[in-house]
Image: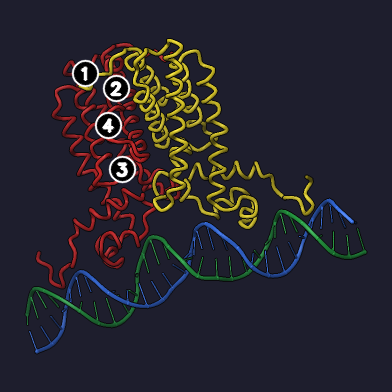
Chain colours: A red, B yellow, C blue, D green
Amino acid sequence: MAGRGRPRGFDRDTALRQAMVTFWERGYEGTSMTDLTTAMGIASASVYACFGSKEELFREAVELYGAMEGDKALRCLETSLTAREGIIGALQVNADRFADPATPPGCMVALSALTGTTDNPELRDFLAGRRALVQQSFRERLERGIGEGDVQDGTDVDAVAGFYATVLQGMAIQSRDGATRARLEAVIACAAAAWDSLARGPERPALR
Amino acid sequence: MAGRGRPRGFDRDTALRQAMVTFWERGYEGTSMTDLTTAMGIASASVYACFGSKEELFREAVELYGAMEGDKALRCLETSLTAREGIIGALQVNADRFADPATPPGCMVALSALTGTTDNPELRDFLAGRRALVQQSFRERLERGIGEGDVQDGTDVDAVAGFYATVLQGMAIQSRDGATRARLEAVIACAAAAWDSLARGPERPALR
DNA sequence: TCATTTCTTTGTTGATCGACAAAGAAATAT
DNA sequence: ATATTTCTTTGTCGATCAACAAAGAAATGA
């Protein structure tokens, strides 16, 4: 297993993490190979030898991002005693991340390839799929809540999961616009206050 | 006032509208001059002569977008009898726009320059300012509602305005990901159901 | 020691980016 | 009719894009 030839002069995980931060900050299209090689501290040929291409590097970076934060939110959903606690907790985990001064503001999955990838539908769908997974995990947690009794039977789990996913994605933009941790908390508090109207009452909320 | 020299061979408003749609679809950085000249049907030299630069053209396109939709939402806020009706109505006006099959999905102001403009802070701030204006108009409508009695005195208007702005921005991403008009309506219904918990009760919503 | 393997450095590739210069075309003013 | 003005067409500019080829450097195995 030990390589035969000259060993790699950089740490792959470290380089990937630095690439992730760069993509997170500047987006996929907004990040040039020069940006990457500068941040990673290696030459472009090493990037291609180690990661294949800019797009493959980006996909790995997104998976690393998901492994770091997504897992924490998923664990919050799983270990929570109620669906409300789980979903609101997941929002808070993300708010922590979005407002962390050590990393770029907002969510990499939500923001790094929304537009500008019109002629790369695979990459767009890749990220859209990651976003859909979050929404699906919300829905599954709501369904579990129905089974466990803390969510009223008859709740429109698709609508409620979509609502909280929408709030989460909106928080990513708010964070990009400079929203502090406290402001994100205030948004979450509002979303939490809506809970009983959505997942407690058996009737669909009236629109007007 | 009648021009002396050769008259322009294209309609400025039409060309601007086509540029707006292109920026809306592909984002600022994702739109090339070739994309623009193709969509507008004119050569790049004509673009520069008529609009100055790509960035100035984009700013004009954003202002046109705001004049088309922002005004409708603002009128909804002004003419509504209650703050609730105004803000929920503004969300619906935007949902109409986001899901209109005749135009690109989602919101141009929210999506067209979120990342990829790291080295152009003026442009980023320009769009962030437009987003802040929406949030401010929500806040002002809430304050008016307090004065008119349909919003409980003591309501945290900053938090509530931020919440509904967050939902609106999240809807833009949902729309980009393929959300139908009906799904956006479901999100709005959830946001509307939260209203009484936020703007009716005098107490701040409890977080847990 | 030396051949082999792998990585790094350096340089370059064709394509595309936004922007503009120069010249030709079409209108008005005198 | 002719000069003037303005627009359009054509071509091109230097910069930058993602990607890779070739050669030098540094490790291992025999």
How far apart marks 2 and 3 lie (CA) works out to 30 Å
Report the residue marked by disc 2.
A157
Residues indicated by labels 2 and 1 sit on the same polypeptide chain: yes
Does A161 sit left or right of B66 as displayed? left
Q: Secondary structure at mark 4?
A: helix
Report the residue marked by disc 4.
A182
Quarter the N terminus of chain A occupies: bottom left
Chain of the residue that carries numbered disc 4 in the rendered image:
A
Chain of the residue that carries numbered disc 1 in the rendered image:
A
Of pointers 2 and 1, the one earlier in the residue sequence: 1
* Residue A14 lies in quadrant: bottom left
Of tags 3 and 1, the one toward the viewer is: 3
Report the residue marked by disc 1.
A146
How far apart marks 3 and 1 lie (CA) works out to 35 Å
Q: Dot 1, crowdedness within 10 Å: few (<14), some or many (≥20)?
A: many
Is there CB contact under 8 Å for labels 2 and 1? yes
Q: Amino acid at mark 4?
A: Ala
Q: Amino acid at mark 2?
A: Val
Is there CB contact under 8 Å for labels 1 and 4? no
